[in-house]
Image (cartoon, rainbow, N blue to C red):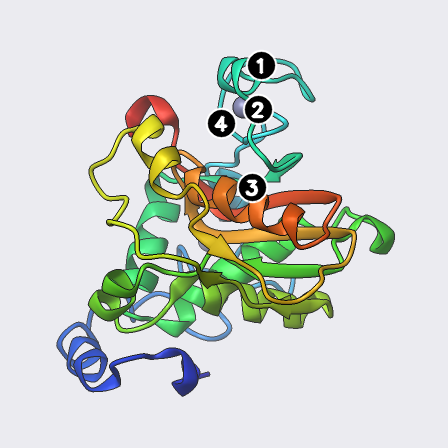
Amino acid sequence: MNLDRSLLGTGRKWGFRVLRHADLGLKHLLPGHCAFCLALPMSGQPWCDECFRALPWNHHACHQCAEPFSGDAYSLCGHCLKQPPAYDSARVGLRYEGEVALLIQRFKFNADPRAGALLVDLMHAGLQRLLPHELPQALIAVPRHPLRAREFGFDQALWITQHLARRLEIHCLVARRARRTPTQRGLDRSARLRNVQDAFAIDVALPAHVAVVDDIMTTGASLDGLAKACSIAGASRVEAWAAARTPLTSS
Ligand SMILES: [Zn+2]
Ligand SMILES: [Zn+2]
């Protein structure tokens, strides 16, 4: 499987990046073997049961923002009680640590499509227990900051969103940046929220139930900004999805 050329932006720089890092991350993800330990999986999945169970699952998390915490299922964290985000709930199955952090780094920094495909498989596995009518009618990726898209050579959130939408057989719609914003890197939570205020726009009428998607959810500020744009474009229920959650306490 190749990364879609249409998503690559400045592809020449990306090509050099891949060649330079081609040796990294390739010893795993061999077809027919567990992506994490090279054992032969029994389940038909790209992982063995033991490695799958050992992943840093985000089972104990705030229902609305997926912040890892020790509360009961369906309870809310302090941030959401005080200042609820624009999205109604979050589905972020994994925490950004250990093997999952390494996998995301291989996808982002080495543009490794097999790492991306495995992330999509893991997100899809986390959604298996949803009934068809519980799925959103469309997915919308957080539009990458142009400087970051150029830096990485492709838009990771859009790549994940398009492949996940294809797996789930639901629409993938596109948002745009309504204005230029400084990069979120290095900003604290409140500064990130201010930075993406009115930053996104959607030019089509949305169905009632949608999910906004990013690769990593840190403070959730970008997902929050995009969720506001979804409400303006007609959605009445917005979920936030990401491959992995960085605990706020460590960001
Ligand atoms: Zn394994
Ligand atoms: Zn929360």
**Mark found first going from the N terminus, 2 or 3:** 2
**Mark found first going from the N terminus, 3 or 1:** 1
Please tell me whether mark 4 sits on a helix, a strand or a loop: loop
Please tell me whether mark 3 sits on a helix, a strand or a loop: loop
79 and 38: which is toward the camera? 79
**Mark found first going from the N terminus, 3 or 4:** 4
The three-letter code of the residue at mark 3 reads Gly
**Circle 2/circle 3 CB separation < 8 Å:** no
Quadrant of the drawing holding the C terminus? top left
Looking at the image, residue 100 sits to the left or right of residue 92; the answer is left
Looking at the image, residue 11 sits to the left or right of residue 62; the answer is left
Please tell me whether mark 1 sits on a helix, a strand or a loop: helix
**Circle 2/circle 1 CB separation < 8 Å:** yes
Ligand 2 within 8 Å, label 2 CB: no
**Mark found first going from the N terminus, 1 or 4:** 4
The residues tagged by marks 1 and 4 sit, at their Cα atoms, a distance apart of 13 Å
Circle 3 sits on which residue? Answer: 93
Ligand 2's quadrant is top right
Can residue 34 be seen in the rendering of this structure? no
Ligand 2 within 8 Å, label 4 CB: yes
**Mark found first going from the N terminus, 4 or 2:** 4
Circle 1 sits on which residue? Answer: 81
Circle 4 sits on which residue? Answer: 67
Q: Residues within 10 Å of mark 2 (few under 14, many from 20)?
A: some
Front position among marks 3 and 1: 1
The x, y position of residue 132, in whole percent, is 84, 56
Circle 2 sits on which residue? Answer: 84
